[in-house]
Image (cartoon, helix red, strand yellow):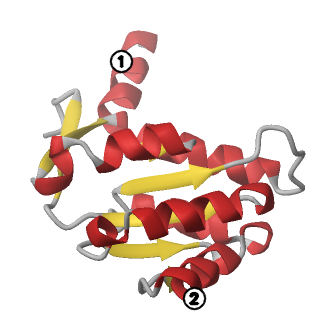
Amino acid sequence: MVTDNYIPFEIGKTKHIALVAHDGKKQDIVEWCDKNKDILKEHFLCGTGTTARLISEKTGLPVRAYNSGPLGGDQQIGAKIVEGVVDFVVFLWDPLEAQPHDPDVKALLRIAAVYDVPIANNIATADFMLNSKFMNEPYQRRVENFDKIVKDRVNKMK
């Protein structure tokens, strides 16, 4: 495994979906979840503070709540990606509104990319992902083997 360029990880049939939305997008994510609750109820849902609470209250879907984004919720979701607990993210961020915790937002987007976790940043992408054939079956994602990359870089320096 140390010599492989990628490490395979399986996203199971039941997805662990993180739901995150900035204030200007909370209504959108609640409406999206309500529209798609027949699909979402088959999966494990989690989200950041207020977003998780609103989705749960308005749709009846169970959503495991972490802290709000500015209080570390984005980082908690990122940590769950690293731990292999979250394998699908819907993050409706507001590109027209400055966020005081912007570095946390960028860190979450970055860690999703590093771990090859699907992430939707708008409703259209969320719709495409939720209606993909991969929602109903396991999926093999590939994570770059950074240990090998570092070892290769060290060997080139010798």
Q: CA distance from mark 1 to mark 2?
A: 55 Å
- Amino acid type at circle 1 is Asn
Compared to residue 142, the image places residue 111 above or below, namely below
Is 94 left, or right, of 55 in this rendering?
right
Report the residue marked by disc 2: 57
Is 89 left, or right, of 69 in this rendering?
left
Q: Which mark is residue 155?
A: 1
Q: Position of residue 131 (x, y in %)?
A: 27, 46
Q: Position of residue 57 (x, y in %)?
A: 57, 88
Q: Residue at x 40, y 74 (%)?
A: 45
| Circle 1 Cα neighbour tier, 10 Å, few/some/many (<14 / 14–19 / ≥20) | few
Question: In what element is the residue under mark 1?
Answer: helix
Q: Nearer the viewer, residue 25 or 119?
A: 25
Quarter of the C terminus within the rendering: top left
| Quarter of image, res 96 | top right
Compared to residue 136, the image places residue 149 above or below, namely above
- Whether residue 85 is visible here, answered yes or no, is yes
| Quarter of image, res 24 | bottom right
| Circle 2 Cα neighbour tier, 10 Å, few/some/many (<14 / 14–19 / ≥20) | few
Quarter of the N terminus within the rendering: top left
Question: In what element is the residue under mark 2?
Answer: helix
Q: Residue at x 15, y 43 (%)?
A: 133
Q: Residue at x 49, y 81 (%)?
A: 59
Q: Position of residue 31 (x, y in %)?
A: 56, 64
Compared to residue 141, the image places residue 72 above or below, namely below
- Whether residue 66 is visible here, answered yes or no, is no
Q: Which mark is residue 10?
A: none
Q: Nearer the viewer, mark 1 or mark 2?
A: 2
Is 65 left, or right, of 35 in this rendering?
right
Is 98 left, or right, of 142 in this rendering?
right
Q: Nearer the viewer, residue 48 or 79?
A: 48
